Amino acid sequence: APEYPPNGAHLDYYLSTAPAGEMKLEILDAKGGLVRTFSAGGGQSGADDQQGMRGPRRGRGGQSSLSAKTGMNRFLWDLRYPGVDGAGFGGPLAAPGRYQARLTIGSWNQTRSFEIRIDPRVAADGVTVADLQEQLELSLKVRDAMGDARRLAGRIREARQKMAGDPAASAKLQALQDRVVTAQMIYPQPMLIDQFSNLARMIGQADQKVGRSAFEFYDDLMKEMNSIKSDLDKIGGN
């Protein structure tokens, strides 16, 4: 059977000796901003410094572990940004453009640039690099908001524990939790966290020009989250 190379950026590097300490690989965007960090050595067999971001992606393939063995090595970056812990799927897919890979061992480091190109089939359908950059920017906002919504749920749980002896406050906090966390029942109505999750899947399922409705949905969800935060502050859930 034929073997198809997995999708992603294949980064080759040679180590004359195994690193005595930690080895770090950083993926940077065209402006030098950090996209992902991976590490190996120092007691680690190979890890992503930011967890909870592996998962299904468009196309075949996945991410490999960063190897610190002597000789030739190959690392496969799956082209994804960090995701959200517990979200169940990977982070946003990088947009076409110039990127850099920086390998650091102790005080030594070396940087090489590479390019992610648009799928010609997507371009033939009229999708532009600017469209995919806009898709990435919205996806990152949704990812951050989803993480914020999960932290908000944690704040509400803590407030409920602190105010367990106050029936009135407990009822108000329960009502807030019901707006953030989807109820455990058959055919429940998705609440804030799951709505952000659904939006992330909707805009990230394919290379596409994101419709205006997705931006409007994001704005509506942010208004809802800010409203819940305000109500929580009034109850005293800081």
Image (tube, rainbow, N blue to C red):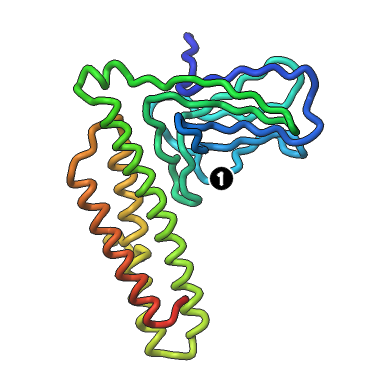
The residue shown at (44%, 40%) is: 90
Single out the residue that lies furthest toward the top: 2
Q: Is 113 drawn above or below residue 90 in the view shown?
A: above
Residue 192 drawn above or below residue 95: below
Q: Position of residue 40 (x, y in %)?
A: 69, 34
Where is residue 72 drawn, in percent x and y?
69, 15
What is the residue that sits farthest to the front in this orientation? 31
Residue at 27% x, 52% y: name it.
218
Q: Relative to 105, is 166 on the left or the right?
A: left
Identified at 41% across, 51% down, the residue is 144
Q: Residues within 10 Å of mark 1 (few under 14, many from 20)?
A: few
Is residue 92 left or right of 63 when viewed as pictured?
left
**Mark 1, residue position:** 51
On screen, residue 206 versus residue 28, left or right, reads: left
Q: How many marks?
A: 1
In this view, the residue in front, 143 or 167, is: 143
Classify residue 47 by image quadrant: top right
Q: For the residue labelled by badge 1, is the local secondary structure a helix, a strand or a loop?
A: loop
The one of 97 and 170 positioned closer to us in this rendering: 97
The residue depicted at 40 percent of the width and 34 percent of the height is 93
In percent of width and height, residue 149 lies at: 40, 60
Q: Amino acid at mark 1?
A: Gln
Q: Is residue 109 above or below residue 214?
A: above
Counting from the top left corner in percent of width and height, residue 46 is at 67, 34
Give the quarter of the image for residue 233: bottom left
